[in-house]
Amino acid sequence: MNIKGLDYNTQRKKLLLPEYGREIQNMVDYAVALPNKEERLHCAKTIVKLMQGKLAPAQNSNDFEQALWDHLYLMSGKQLDIDWPYDVSNAEKFLSKPQPLKLPQQNIRMRHYGKLIEQLFEKLKTMPEGPERDALAIDTANQMKRDLVLWGHGSIEDAKVADDLEYYTDGIVKIDLNKTALQNFVPSSEMAAKKGKKRKN
């Protein structure tokens, strides 16, 4: 829909650095068009002061003022002809995108447990019998139960956790639930419901 007199952002030129807003960009375009070099520099200094107000929380950084002039250089399309108070030759670093992080969640056999639990299974399989392995087995089982509660949004039988621990450690690690009780975990939704009931009472 095109209504005469209305100016939509979707119809305007895309902003290179939208955090400064269109008014600042219009000022930069105005400064580029000024015929006198001294006037352009004076205008640029005023624009930088206004830009500084837009990014007030970042003023404590050591290279804050340098960054403002770099931004001004980029916003001008590298066309602002002034005696730059800073070296702006590396300004394009602000436009480069960081390389995507490599996520560790690859080839996870048990999505409900996650990669770290899978690594614990492998560690438990290589540990010698003794108190240290028993303690790690209990910690692992409690974390498994917590993960299952969060995954299934409900209570989980200890026997299920014990069976999974034995299965994923190839039968090497077993927990005697008659001697050891796992922790009880309440889903956050149930916890919130219980708190709501207490407030009503």
Image: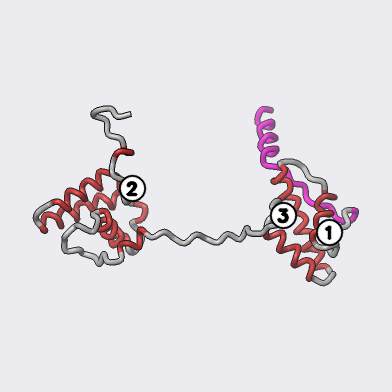
Left or right: 41 as drawn, with respect to 197: left
The amino acid pointed to by label 2 is: Pro
Kindly identify which residue carries mark 1.
Answer: 166
Foreground of the two, 89 or 144: 89
Which of marks 1 and 3 precedes in the sequence? 3
Q: Secondary structure at mark 1?
A: helix
Please, which residue is most extreme toward the left here? 36
Left or right: 195 as drawn, with respect to 9: right
Please, which residue is most extreme toward the right here? 178
**Circles 2, 1 touching at the beta carbon (< 8 Å):** no
**In the rendered view, would you say 5 is above or below 158?**
above
- State which quadrant residue 102 falls in: bottom right
Front of the two marks 3 and 1: 3
Image quarter (top left, top right, bottom left or bottom right) of the N terminus? top left
Image quarter (top left, top right, bottom left or bottom right) of the C terminus? top right
Kindly identify which residue carries mark 2.
Answer: 18
Foreground of the two, 4 or 169: 4
- State which quadrant residue 78 falls in: bottom left
Q: How is the image coloured?
A: secondary structure
Foreground of the two, 108 or 39: 108
**Mark 2: few/some/many CA within 10 Å (<14, 14-19, 20+):** few
The magenta segment is 178-201
Kindly identify which residue carries mark 3.
Answer: 110
What is the distance, in whole Å, between disc 3 and disc 1 at their CAs? Answer: 14 Å
The amino acid pointed to by label 1 is: Glu
The amino acid pointed to by label 3 is: Met
